[in-house]
Image (tube, rainbow, N blue to C red):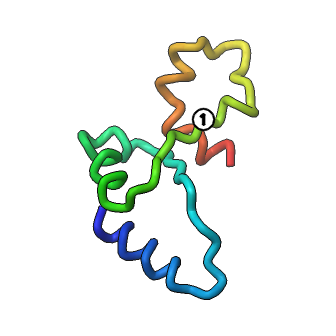
């Protein structure tokens, strides 16, 4: 969490910095207990899961429960 906070501070110190209003996260790391909460507390900006299925619909063989289960991992392969 502190590394993200210091990176954000470095970015914000840049003359070209655009205000960051929210972050999106993907991958299995976010399943780590309290990780997102700690990062939100450290940087003071909301983090939201990136849902690749908002724009790309799962194929006919993928049910809703399975799509929800693989959501953290599939966004990288969807790109």
Quarter of the image where the N terminus is located: bottom left
Residue 30 image point, x, y percent: 37, 44
For residue 59, what is the image quadrant? Answer: top right
Residue 6 image point, x, y percent: 36, 75
In the picture provided, is 8 more to the left or to the right than 1?
A: right
Q: Residue at x 34, y 38 (%)?
A: 31
Residue 60 image point, x, y percent: 72, 13
Figure check: 3 above or below 56: below
Labels in figure, total: 1
Figure check: 8 above or below 79: below
In the picture provided, is 36 more to the left or to the right than 66?
A: left
Residue matched to label 1: 51
Q: Residue at x 46, y 48 (%)?
A: 46
Who is closer to the viewer here, 20 or 30?
20
Mark 1 closeness class: few <14, some 14–19, many ≥20 residues within 10 Å: some
Residue 53 image point, x, y percent: 66, 30
Figure check: 54 above or below 63: below
Who is closer to the viewer here, 72 or 41?
41
Figure check: 79 above or below 59: below
Given the current orientation, which residue lies at the most extreme bottom position? 15
Who is closer to the viewer here, 31 or 48?
48
Q: Residue at x 61, y 78 (%)?
A: 17
Q: Residue at x 51, y 14 (%)?
A: 65
Given the current orientation, which residue lies at the most extreme left position? 33
Q: Tag 1, which secondary structure?
A: loop
């Amino acid at each position: 969490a502190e590394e993200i906070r210091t990176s954000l501070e470095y970015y914000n110190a840049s003359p070209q910095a655009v205000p960051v209003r929210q972050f999106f996260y993907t991958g299995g790391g976010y399943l780590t207990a309290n990780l997102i909460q700690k990062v939100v507390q450290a940087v003071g900006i909301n983090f939201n899961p990136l849902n690749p299925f908002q724009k790309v619909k799962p194929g006919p063989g993928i049910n809703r429960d399975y799509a929800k289960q693989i959501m953290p991992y599939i966004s990288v392969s969807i790109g």
